[in-house]
Image: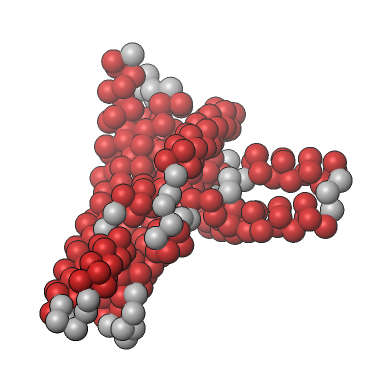
Amino acid sequence: MIASLRRIRAIAGTTLIELARLRVFYVLVLFALVLIVSSTFLARISFQQELQVTKDISLGAINFFLSLLAIVATAQLLPRDIEDRVVYSVLAKPVPRFEYILGKFLGVLGLLALSLVAMSVLCLVVLHLREQSALQEANRQVTQLAPDQLSSTLRSIQMAGINRDLIAALVLVLAKSAILAAATLCISAFATSNIFTITAMAMVYLIGHLESIAREYWLEHAAGWVTRTFLAVVAFIFPDLQAFNISDQVIGGIPIPAHLIVQLLGLTTFYVLSYILLATAIFYQREL
């Protein structure tokens, strides 16, 4: 067991180092950081809800680029290792294919976590600076506002700034990206090129975000057992990625129930394990 964990950790560490050297990693993170920083200037255009605008742009940038990084980075793993014949040297050692697949996924997950931390820190810094600026401006207007109005203004600014729901939204962004990485690894287990994998994952990404809308429409207009069975199969195979986007609630100040976060994290665990096991089964059948 200890030897197995060491092998998985070694594969994950090697994968993380390889992915960190990819130019696409730096480009995606750079674009995300630029968008987050630019949000503070875009917020100045609006004299109201400055913190909401900053938070909206920052969460949108982190969500989009982390999802894109999960797909693009993972799609290159197996095809590149097979092309460079690295997989042959690894599997020639006493390394089961399950450990190889799991190590690759954990390496990608480490890359996603580091990227999220980098972008989240900048997002929180920008929000903190905007919040302090708004609080100072409100305090300067203390003579123009009634005490109860000033207290309400300060409380609304603090609620619109950094809070628990914002952290929960960032955690769910990572959970969503983990699902995308696991699904990408599953497809790349039988794909012959990363172009095919990326194209297939683009369809999965689109289906995952439109699934809830299509389900509501079909259940409203055609509620037969055939439709319900088909929708249940689609919902089982393709995760509802839109459920992980709680940015609208966070920006609107709507409290996020704790049971919803737990439910989504449980759903993440189910899909990640399912995709990893399926990828392992496919990879075992693949002739190398």
- The quarter of the picture where residue 160 lies is bottom left
**Point 48% across, 42% down: residue:** 260
Q: Is residue 209 depicted above or below 102 in this figure?
A: below
Position of the N terminus by quadrant: top left
- Between 24 and 259, the one lying in front of the other is 259
Question: Residue 114 placed where, x, y %?
Answer: 26, 49
Question: Residue 219 placed where, x, y %?
Answer: 77, 52
- The quarter of the picture where residue 279 lies is top right
Question: Residue 217 placed where, x, y %?
Answer: 74, 58
34 displayed left or right of 242: left
**Point 38% across, 23% down: residue:** 95
Question: Residue 116 placed where, x, y %?
Answer: 30, 53
Q: Residue furthest top?
A: 1
Tell me which colouring the rendered structure shows.
secondary structure
Q: Is residue 23 depicted above or below 53 in this figure?
A: above
- The quarter of the picture where residue 26 lies is bottom left
**Point 41% across, 31% down: residue:** 102
**Residue 138 makes an appearance in the image:** yes
Q: Is residue 161 depicted above or below 266 in this figure?
A: below
**Residue 178 makes an appearance in the image:** no
95 displayed left or right of 214: left
**Point 36% across, 42% down: residue:** 109
Q: Is residue 284 depicted above or below 204 in this figure?
A: above
User: How many tags in the picture?
Assistant: 0
